[in-house]
Image: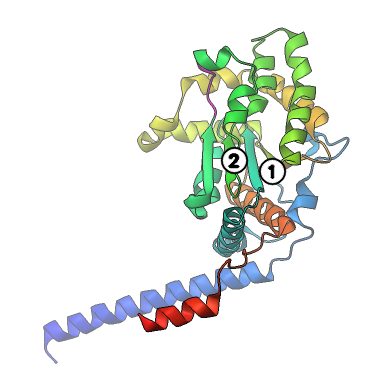
Amino acid sequence: MGKKSRSKKKKHDDVVEEAAKQAKKLKKAAKAAEDASATASFTDALRAGEGTQIAGIDPRSTPGFDGDKAAGEGLLAGLAEEVSDLQERLYAESKAGGRRSVLLVIQGMDTSGKGGIMRHVVGAVDPQGVEITAFKAPTAEEKEHPFLWRIRRALPGPGQIGVFDRSHYEDVLVVRVHDLVPRAQWSRRYGQINRFEAGVIDKGTTIIKVMLHISKDEQKARLSERLDRPDKHWKFNPGDLDEREHWEDYQEAYQAVIDQTSTDEAPWFVVPADRKWYARLAVMNLLKEHLEAMDPQWPEADFDVAEQQARLEET
C-alpha cells in the first residue's frame, strides 16, 4: 500500500472512530435521560398555589426532575416529537370542526430566557400550527383601546398553539413599576384579566402561564456576557440596566400577579430559570402534559376509505 493510500485509510479510520465516539456519547446521554426519574409531573411541581412565594423558590432548582444537564438535554428531542404529534392531532381535530386551542404565555425579567424558549421549545414543533406574538410597548392605535384589545386580536384560532412572548401581564408589571397609569386603574386589571381568561377558557382554549424565575446574580452574569462578546452586543439593550434598577419593584409586582391571577382555571407555573436547559425542559413538559390532558384525536374520515383505495388502484 502506497503512502497516499495509507494516509487516505488513516483519515477514513479517524472519521469512523470519531463517529463511533459521538454515537457512544449520544447513547450515554439518552441512557442518562431514560434513567433520570421525575419526582412529580411538571404541572404539579411548578404550579403556583395559594401562598406561593416567589422569593422562596430557588432559581437554580429543578422541580420535578432529578437528572442533570446531559439527561435533560437528552430528553428534549424526544419530547419535541411527542409534542409535535399532539399538536398535529389538535390541528387535524380543528379541520373536522374542533374548536380547541392552546395559549402559552411566557413572562420573565430581561435575560430570563424567553428567546431560548421560543427557539428550543416552540421552534421545535411544526410551525404550521403555531403562532407567536411578541408584545412590545403599545402603539398609538393600541393606546386608543382598552388594554386587552390587542390581546384579544392575537388569541389562537381553533387547532392552534398561540404563544405570547410577554403579554397582557405587562399592564400590571411595567405599568405598575413605572406608574404609567394611576394605581386605581392598574389595580382593577387583575380582576379584568381573570374574567377575560375565564371567558377564553370557556371558548375552548387551554391557557398555560409561565413565569421564568431568574436570580439577580444570574441576570447580571448574562448581561455581562452580552457586553463581553461582540457577537452578543446586538442582544444588549442599555434599557435593560435601567430596568434592573427596579429589580425589587418587579419582584413585588410579579408576586402580586401570582397572588391575584393564579386561578384554578388558569394557574401560573413558576419555572426556575438560572439553568437554561432546565427551563426549556420544564416548559416543553408543561406543554406536553397539557396537550395530553386535552387528548386531541385524529378525526374520522368523512369518506369511504376502501372505496378510495380501490379507485387509487385503478389509476
Pointer 1 and pointer 2: residues touching (CB < 8 Å)?
Answer: yes
Q: Amino acid at mark 2?
A: Pro
Identified at 62% across, 57% down, the residue is: 93
Residue 235 percent coordinates (x, y) = 44, 32
Q: What residue range appears in magenta?
A: 135-139
Residue 118 percent coordinates (x, y) = 52, 44
Q: Which residue is mark 2?
A: 156
Residue 240 percent coordinates (x, y) = 53, 23
Q: Quadrant of residue 53?
A: top right
Q: Quadrant of residue 72?
A: bottom right
Q: Residue furthest top?
A: 182
Quick one: quadrant of the C terminus?
A: bottom left
Identified at 37% across, 74% down, the residue is: 18
Residue 138 is one of the magenta-drawn residues: yes
Identified at 71% across, 51% down, the residue is: 62
Label 1 secondary element: strand
Of pointers 1 and 2, the one earlier in the residue sequence: 2
Q: Nearer the viewer, residue 129 or 158?
A: 158
Q: Which residue is mark 1?
A: 205
